[in-house]
Image (spheres, helix red, strand yellow):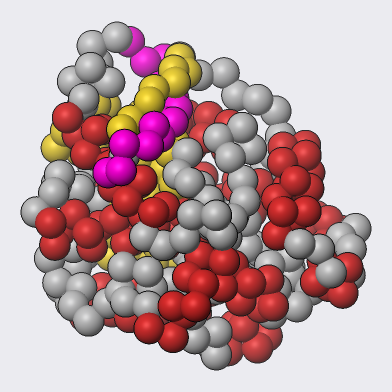
Amino acid sequence: MSLDPDIARFLSTLPPPAVVAGLTLQEIRAISEEALPPLQGPLEDVAQVRPFNVTGHDGHAIAVRAYWPAGHQPGQARPGLLFAHGGGWFQCSLAVYDRPCRALANATGCVVLAVDYRLAPEHRFPIPLEDVYAALCWSHAEAAALDIDPTRLMVGGDSAGGNLAAAVALLARDRHGPPIHHQLLLYPALDTAIDTDSHRQFGEGYYLSTALMQRCWDAYLGGGLAHADGLAVPARAPDLRGLPPATVLVCEYDPLRDEGEQYASRLEQAGVAVQCERLPGMVHACLHLLGTAPASRALLVRSATLLAAAI
């Protein structure tokens, strides 16, 4: 399919790659805080939004924001979705993801628990992952109070958050941690190799660039890029057996498309039930384009449909 015309118009308004390359990570971080919310569409009403604090492995207080979908009644046990936001591990926040998390809760009927993990490069791997794992343990322990069915607690995330969701599933398996019912991986960043056909085809001019993705990995892993293990780079995980079933949604015009599909194939080969779909006409980070390109809502529709089937 051709590139969605609304997305094509949006891409034409973006600064040239040379301008972005000249910005520091901190400058990009500040720009995203202001630029992303206006693209996301209207603020959806949900039943309730509540803030919580979770104690991390090192005593750090991790903010978690919980969203109960519209129509929820207290005491009604629902599936829970612990959600790690995207942003290349170095940008975005609970504020930037407020609209997407509301939309995700309403579309899926899940209680969405958004994790404010610490950001790179100030806090490199494994700190963001450990923050998400601490939030997973808390979510399971507090499931009853959160109106979550602990047997239907899932993990999910988009882009770098998809990396963290995949990695926390690996970590929970290896640590014999809380049981995870399902993984929702939205255009996940899973491989540092950056040598796929999709990187060669869409590595410039389609929102996320290969050059920026390399900077994201550098920020997250620092000097450990060449020696990163499967928790940092899930595509390198030697054994995917025993992981929870997965839904993997990738975008047709995304440099990360192929690594998401390859990871889904590896999961299937390891005996993990997986549903993988390619969203036609979409680019990376389309979760932020719900108000700019109506066709981006396919991401929510397919997430909801596939999660409902999995649940």
| Residue closer to the observer: 240 or 27 | 27
Q: Give the answer, above or below, for where 154 lies relative to 210.
A: above
> Left of 10 or right of it: where is 119?
left
Is 96 or 24 nearer to us in this picture? 24
Residue 63 magenta: yes
Left or right placement of residue 113 versus residue 272 in this view: right
Instruction: Determine whether, in the image, residue 68 is placed left or right of residue 253.
Output: left
The answer to which image quadrant residue 7 occupies is: bottom right
Query: Which quadrant, please, contains the C terminus?
Result: top left
The residue positioned farthest toward the top in the image shown: 74
* Residue at 69% from the left image edge and 78% from the top image edge: 211
Residue 240 percent coordinates (x, y)? 20, 73
Q: Position of residue 144 (x, y in %)?
A: 18, 20
**Image height check: is 77 above or below 137?**
above
Res. 167 image quadrant: bottom left
**Nearer to us in this view, 130 or 245:** 130
- Figure disc tally: 0
Report the residue at 44% width, 78% height from top.
Answer: 224
What residue range appears in magenta? 57-73
Residue for point 31% across, 68% down: 231
Residue 288 locus on image (x, y percent) = 66, 46
Residue 26 x, y percent position in the rendering: 72, 54
The image quadrant that residue 51 belongs to is top left
The residue at 38%/49% (across/down) is 156
Extreme left residue here?
176
> Which quadrant of the rendered structure holds the N terminus?
bottom right
Q: Is residue 71 magenta?
A: yes
Q: Is residue 77 visible?
A: no
Q: Is residue 159 above or below residue 68?
A: below
Can residue 55 be seen here? yes
